[in-house]
Amino acid sequence: MLALTRRAAGIAVLLALGACTGPPWTLSRSPTEISLRWYPDDTPATAAEAIAQQHCRSSGKTAELVSYEQDGSAQIGRYSCR
């Protein structure tokens, strides 16, 4: 019974941590690119650029904006690592 309680507590912690991840959200990523989605009323584009730069720096490159798209009220940014 104690093991089951611990397992349930562990799952609850993981779910809570996953819920803490805020915008911008990653749509896709690879070593050469990353696509992010956010709501511009709540999150500035500079936040997305910072995440893209961090992603590309992990492979020794810098992020370059390829395109912005509007999807309803959400913004989608596609970045290439160069």
Image: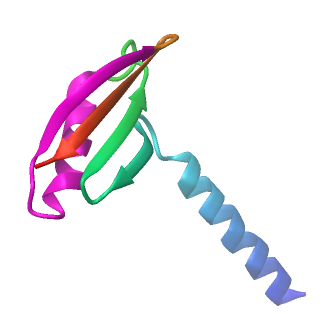
Q: Is residue 60 above or below residue 69?
A: below
Residue 29, position as x, y percentages in the image? 37, 51
Q: Is residue 44 above or below residue 14?
A: above
Q: Which residues are magenta?
A: 44-70
- In front: 57, or 44? 57
Residue 38, position as x, y percentages in the image? 41, 26
- In front: 8, or 53? 53
Residue 17 falls in image quadrant: bottom right
How many marks can you see? 0
Residue 62, position as x, y percentages in the image? 9, 48
Q: Seen in the image, is 17 located left or right of residue 43?
A: right
Q: Is residue 22 above or below residue 72?
A: below
At a point 24% along the width and 54% down the height, the residue shown is: 32
Question: How is the model colour-coded?
Answer: rainbow
At a point 34% along the width and 23% down the height, the residue shown is: 43
Q: Is residue 51 magenta?
A: yes
Q: Is residue 17 magenta?
A: no
Q: Name the quarter where the N terminus is drawn.
A: bottom right
- In front: 76, or 17? 76
At a point 24% along the width and 38% down the height, the residue shown is: 79
Residue 78, position as x, y percentages in the image? 30, 34
Q: Residue furthest right?
A: 1
Q: Seen in the image, is 28 located left or right of residue 43?
A: right
